[in-house]
Amino acid sequence: MIQTVLFDFDGTLFDTGEGILRSVQYALEGFGIHETDTARLRKFVGPPLLDSFSELYAMQPAQARAATERYRERYQPIGVYECEIYPGIPELLLRLQQAGFRMAIVSNKADPAVQLIRTLYFDGIIDVAVGESSACAKKPAPDMVLAALQRLGSTADDAIYLGDSEVDLQTARNSGLPCATVGWGFRTEAELRAAGAQTVYHSPEALGKALLNGSIQ
């Protein structure tokens, strides 16, 4: 039975679109690119930034690294606060905590930002947060998931990963965990299904009910 829940952050716990999109625009402006296509910008939510700058704007490795650093120049002091918790998430987390679930955040954000987020918004509720660092490769590599399980004292046998993107689905597969996807994030249900999602939950209430009664898929 599931007793450990690992949460993606962007698009799963928080609507972080504004801060991410504005920070991507800031990074691109450093290269003379004035991007206003919101659909294109939203593709940055989930995958590693280096990959997105490379694939979406054909940047060479050095350029993609410079763009990522410029993104962080704005995101870490400003963008991290341009976010809003999804309705129903605080109640969901409280119910899971009261039921004895172990919980962690696993995010592709830089680890200092992930630790700040946990402290600001989830202190006393979620005890573990893992972000990208020299010790943990970014999703979809399994490193951060495995680190979170170790810190929680859990194993893959009683854990599930929750996310809103194809990257989350691949991360779960690479880690040997089941993955439940949420439909209130940055991908449509059609996109999630195409990426292999078996079940898409459309409200924190429905997700909580499935977790608490053991029917989560």
Image (spheres, helix red, strand yellow):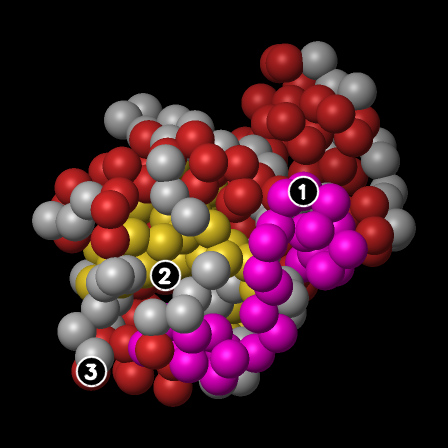
| Nearer to us: label 3 or label 1 | 1
Asked which quadrant contains residue 162, the reply is: bottom left
Kindly check if marks 3 and 1 are in contact, taking CB atoms under 8 A apart as contact.
Answer: no
Q: Residue at x 70, y 51 (%)?
A: 193
Which residue is under mark 1?
Answer: 195
Q: Amino acid at mark 1?
A: Ala
Q: Secondary structure at mark 2?
A: helix
Which class describes the residues within 10 Å of circle 1: few (<14), some (14-19), or many (20+)?
some
Kindly check if marks 2 and 1 are in contact, taking CB atoms under 8 A apart as contact.
Answer: no
Disc on the earlier residue, 2 or 1: 2
Q: Residue at x 30, y 83 (%)?
A: 95
Q: Secondary structure at mark 1?
A: loop
Gap in angstroms between the C-alphas marked 3 and 1: 33 Å
Residue 59 seen in this snapshot: yes
Which residue is under mark 2?
Answer: 117
Disc on the earlier residue, 3 or 1: 3
